[in-house]
């Protein structure tokens, strides 16, 4: 091949130049070697100038393919270093055959393992033999197999995860039994009982910290969470059972206990402890003994605590704690409303729900949550809970009432946000879908029963066209559901 002949010629020329350079160095020692250069710069001026052979003279004429290049005049054949074997495969070296009969180089077509492939790429100047083709299959081309999935370490799961949890339950039951037995015998007075509870909480917290340093995370979380639980139970007994502390002090001590648990959870980066502290914080209003419960204080605490835990969950990207802090708020509010006489304070409960949803809406616009799906789910489910609270507190059978005004306010808010997002060049998927649902609920309130199907179909058509125009799959699905409702 023409490419192989050109490579042979180039290698022959390079070898001949190397031979000539070695010969010149032997004839003129010290040339080209800085270690053998004389210190005196004038020393070279006294040496006779040796005539140099033009390097291009013996090789000016092109050689025929496969020809053996002769040695330059006055240059002996290259014999290599003492003890070195002659390198086969180089033209002009004894024992190295050149020419067309020379075998292919390793790794070229025709070599074992690399079958020659005919194609337009062969023989083109400047291209390798496998130019434009996939790499040949070989040991290096094979990917290593994926490591097998490690088996479940049941010893670790049982000994370090489940046994500590069973241990803390058994320990609490044993302590409770011993406590009851000592009280029945008259050995423990009321202040001593509360003091023992504080000591037990402190001991559990201390040993929990030691387990963290020993890298036993499962047992450490159980001990740290249990210490806060024992602390709150101690304050509950001192306040509710023994009446040793007033309500305001018990309320403050509950808050300090939850704050200690949250601080520990953040310091240890434990989402489990965050969830436990969130649930425990929602129980504080129920642990305070009060003859005349105040809706503003109870609902206000629940709202502030929910917003604080939501911000904490967003800050550390705790996805499970994020949903717990948002969704669990509605359960204590519902229990508070049903357990007390808060008919005249229902606007307080509804205001708390409105403020929580408004904060989520503002956060989605100002500082979007890193988990986009979680934010969308929280907005849509939150709006659904808002609608349920509106109709549970203000539903009137005598026609449109305050609930219709509330729904149109939310519909206008979400519609304006969707319009603003479209003008900003972004598709308002969840905002547009929630606005469509809000307008539907408002239509159900103000439109008569006879004209309701037509109104729903008109809104569904407008929503479907808007979803197709903006390429919003969520809006298209919402409009399709409205079509089913309108039929």
Image (cartoon, grey):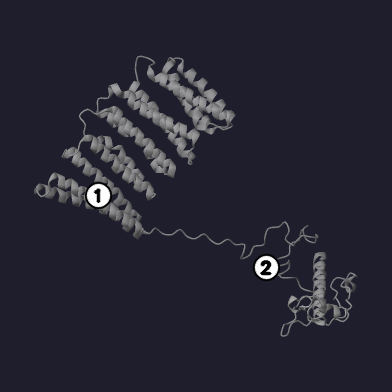
Figure quadrant of residue 94: bottom right
Identity of the residue drawn at 34% across and 56% down: 212
Q: Which of the numbered marks, if any, corresponds to residue 163?
A: none
Query: From where the camera sits, is residue 287 visible?
Result: no
Above or below, 126 relative to 239: below
Quadrant of the rendering where the N terminus is positioned: bottom right
Figure quadrant of residue 485: top left
* Residue 81 screen position, x and y as percent: 74, 82
Of all residues, the one furthest to the left in this rendering is 185
Q: Which residue is mark 2?
A: 113
**Residue 117 or 67: which is nearer the viewer?**
67
Identity of the residue drawn at 18% across and 45% down: 194
Above or below, 299 relative to 374: above
Identity of the residue drawn at 38% across and 42% down: 321
Figure quadrant of residue 164: bottom left
Q: Nearer the viewer, mark 2 or mark 1?
A: 1
Q: Would you say 241 lies left or right of 381 here?
A: left
Q: Residues within 10 Å of mark 1 (few under 14, many from 20)?
A: many
Query: From where the camera sits, is residue 30 visible?
Result: yes
**Residue 270 or 261: which is nearer the viewer?**
261
* Residue 289 screen position, x and y as percent: 21, 34
Q: Are marks 2 and 1 in contact (CB under 8 Å)?
A: no
Q: Which residue is mark 1?
A: 201
- Number of numbered labels in the structure image: 2
């Amino acid at each position: 091949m023409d490419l192989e002949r050109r490579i042979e010629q180039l290698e022959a020329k390079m070898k001949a130049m190397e031979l000539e350079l070695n010969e010149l160095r032997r004839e003129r020692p010290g040339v080209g070697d800085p270690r053998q250069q004389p210190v005196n710069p004038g020393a070279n001026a006294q040496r006779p100038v040796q005539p140099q052979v033009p390097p291009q003279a013996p090789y000016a004429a092109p050689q025929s393919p496969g020809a053996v290049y002769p040695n330059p005049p006055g240059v002996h054949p290259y014999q290599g270093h003492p003890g070195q074997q002659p390198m086969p495969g180089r033209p002009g070296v004894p024992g190295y055959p050149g020419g067309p009969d020379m075998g292919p180089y390793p790794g070229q077509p025709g070599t074992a393992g690399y079958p020659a492939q005919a194609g337009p790429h062969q023989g083109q100047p400047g291209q390798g033999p496998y130019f434009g083709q996939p790499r040949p299959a070989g040991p290096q081309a094979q990917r290593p197999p994926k490591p097998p999935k490690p088996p479940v370490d049941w010893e670790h799961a049982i000994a370090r995860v489940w046994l500590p949890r069973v241990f803390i339950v058994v320990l609490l039951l044993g302590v409770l039994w011993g406590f009851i037995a000592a009280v029945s015998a008259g050995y423990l007075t009321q202040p001593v009982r509360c003091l023992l509870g504080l000591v037990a909480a402190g001991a559990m917290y201390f040993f929990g910290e030691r387990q963290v340093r020993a890298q036993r995370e499962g047992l450490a979380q159980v001990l740290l969470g249990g210490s806060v639980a024992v602390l709150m139970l101690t304050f509950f007994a001192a306040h509710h059972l023994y009446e040793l502390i007033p309500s305001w002090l018990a309320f403050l001590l509950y808050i300090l206990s939850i704050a200690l648990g949250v601080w520990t959870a953040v310091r240890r980066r434990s989402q489990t402890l965050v969830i436990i502290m969130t649930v425990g914080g929602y129980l504080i209003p129920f642990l305070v003994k009060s003859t005349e419960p105040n809706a503003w204080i109870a609902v206000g605490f629940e709202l502030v605590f929910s917003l604080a835990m939501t911000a904490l969950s967003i800050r550390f990207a705790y996805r499970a704690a994020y949903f717990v802090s948002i969704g669990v708020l509605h359960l204590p509010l519902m229990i508070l409303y049903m357990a007390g006489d808060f008919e005249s304070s229902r606007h307080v409960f509804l205001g708390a729900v409105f403020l929580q949803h408004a904060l989520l809406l503002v956060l989605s616009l100002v500082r979007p949550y890193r988990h986009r799906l979680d934010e969308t789910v929280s907005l849509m489910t939150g709006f659904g809970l808002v609608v349920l609270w509106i109709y549970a507190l203000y539903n009137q059978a005598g026609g449109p009432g305050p609930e219709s005004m509330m729904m149109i306010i939310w519909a206008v808010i979400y519609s304006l946000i969707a319009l603003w997002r479209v003008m900003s060049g972004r598709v308002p998927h969840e905002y547009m879908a929630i606005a469509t649902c809000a307008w539907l609920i408002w239509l159900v309130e103000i439109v008569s029963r006879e004209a309701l199907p037509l109104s729903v179909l008109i809104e569904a058509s407008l929503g479907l066209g808007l979803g197709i125009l903006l390429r919003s799959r969520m809006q298209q699905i919402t409009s399709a559901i409205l079509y089913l409702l309108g039929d």
